[in-house]
């Protein structure tokens, strides 16, 4: 199969028929073998009914329905597991991403041998205050931290080599940083393509202000996990030894001072409590690193979702 089109969605019943027809048209014009995987993240409208109706007309349409809303990362992760295409394209269900971009994205993966290609919505139609400016800030921070030269990490329109989506696990709200996850997994050829951004035709955006706070926390989390998930002792151990050493050296200074001056009081000085606290913190950090090493070597899969129904997926 040439392509798997993965579309996570939440309450997008109005846009699904138009989006599906548009994708089918592009697939037929380019003679692609394909599947469309709609990942319904616990919609409360008639989105799933629409998906089943679309599948009745076109067996290339498949669906996954979650028992409740787990978030976009969960939807993508489960759809990635089910994807069979050599190239996997992700796009949003709100018609702001154009299916006409798919052939060129496919070519960049299949012919130009990119591991991942991220869309760049250079000209946007979102609210500048609530979406554009915060997006530019987080993209700038992510570029600096990850060393990946992309303008729009959070663009829903992306293309992947099948090996990438089968090698990464998207959890929490890490969908914003899939290029970073791919890089940490060893995929180095990451590219970018300017794509069309369209005005929302139906419904309203499903993301609020909390995504900015969550985005920053996720960036810190993914940076830590990427560097230390398989070797937590390298982080906690270093800081534990540092704090323990500071505490011991301070204690040694107090002991020597007491020996030299018998009238010197130890327990009534702030330095005593600072050294004691540093020793305790150092021991706790070292133990955290040791426990982390044990967990990282024996941890089972982290994701568990209640899937209510599937359509066309084994």
Image (tube, helix red, strand yellow):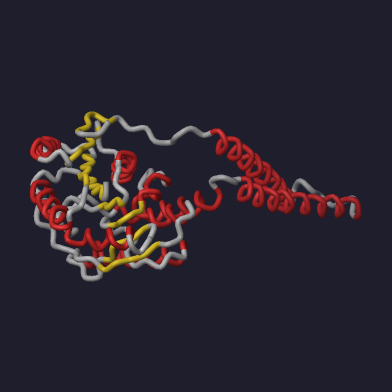
Q: How many marks?
A: 0
Query: In the figure, residue 297 lies in which quadrant?
Result: top right
Which is nearer the eye, 83 or 299?
A: 83
- Residue in the image at 77% along x and 49% along y: 248
* On-image quarter of the C terminus: top left
Which is nearer the eye, 307 or 218?
A: 307
Tell me: 189 left or right of 2: right
Counting from the top left corner in percent of width and height, residue 99 is at 17, 57
Which is nearer the eye, 256 or 225?
A: 225
Residue at far front of view: 31
Tell me: 147 left or right of 279: left
Query: In the figure, residue 116 lies in which quadrant?
Result: bottom left
- Residue in the image at 21% along x and 70% along y: 123
* Residue 92 higher or lower than 169, as above or below: below
- Residue in the image at 22% along x and 47% along y: 7
Counting from the top left corner in percent of width and height, residue 67 is at 24, 31
Residue at far bottom of view: 123
Counting from the top left corner in percent of width and height, residue 84 is at 30, 42
Counting from the top left corner in percent of width and height, residue 23 is at 15, 52
* Residue 165 higher or lower than 183, as above or below: above
């Amino acid at each position: 199969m040439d392509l798997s089109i993965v579309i996570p969605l939440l309450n997008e019943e109005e846009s699904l028929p138009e989006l599906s027809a548009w994708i089918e048209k592009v697939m037929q014009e380019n003679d692609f073998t394909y599947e469309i995987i709609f990942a319904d993240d616990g919609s409360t409208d008639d989105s799933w009914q629409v998906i089943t109706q679309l599948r009745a007309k076109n067996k290339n349409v498949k669906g996954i329905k979650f028992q409740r809303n787990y978030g976009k990362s969960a939807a993508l992760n489960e759809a990635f597991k089910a994807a069979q295409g050599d190239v996997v394209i992700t796009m949003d269900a709100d018609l702001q991403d154009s299916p006409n971009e798919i052939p060129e994205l496919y070519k960049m993966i299949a012919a130009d041998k990119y591991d991942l290609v991220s869309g760049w919505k250079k000209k946007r139609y979102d609210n500048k205050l609530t979406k554009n400016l915060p997006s530019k800030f987080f993209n700038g921070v992510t570029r600096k931290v990850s060393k990946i030269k992309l303008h729009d990490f959070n663009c829903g329109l992306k293309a992947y080599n099948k090996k990438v989506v089968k090698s990464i696990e998207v959890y929490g709200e890490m969908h914003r940083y899939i290029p970073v996850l791919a890089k940490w997994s060893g995929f180095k050829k990451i590219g970018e393509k300017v794509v069309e951004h369209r005005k929302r035709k139906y419904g309203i955006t499903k993301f609020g202000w909390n995504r900015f706070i969550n985005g920053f926390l996720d960036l810190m989390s993914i940076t830590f996990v990427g560097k230390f998930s398989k070797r937590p002792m390298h982080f906690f151990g270093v800081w534990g030894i540092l704090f323990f050493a500071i505490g011991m050296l301070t204690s040694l200074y107090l002991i020597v001072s007491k020996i030299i001056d018998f009238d010197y009081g130890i327990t009534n000085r702030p330095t005593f409590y600072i050294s004691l606290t540093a020793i305790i913190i150092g021991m706790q950090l070292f133990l955290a690193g040791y426990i982390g090493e044990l967990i990282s070597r024996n941890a089972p899969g982290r994701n568990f979702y209640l899937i209510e129904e599937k359509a066309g997926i084994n």
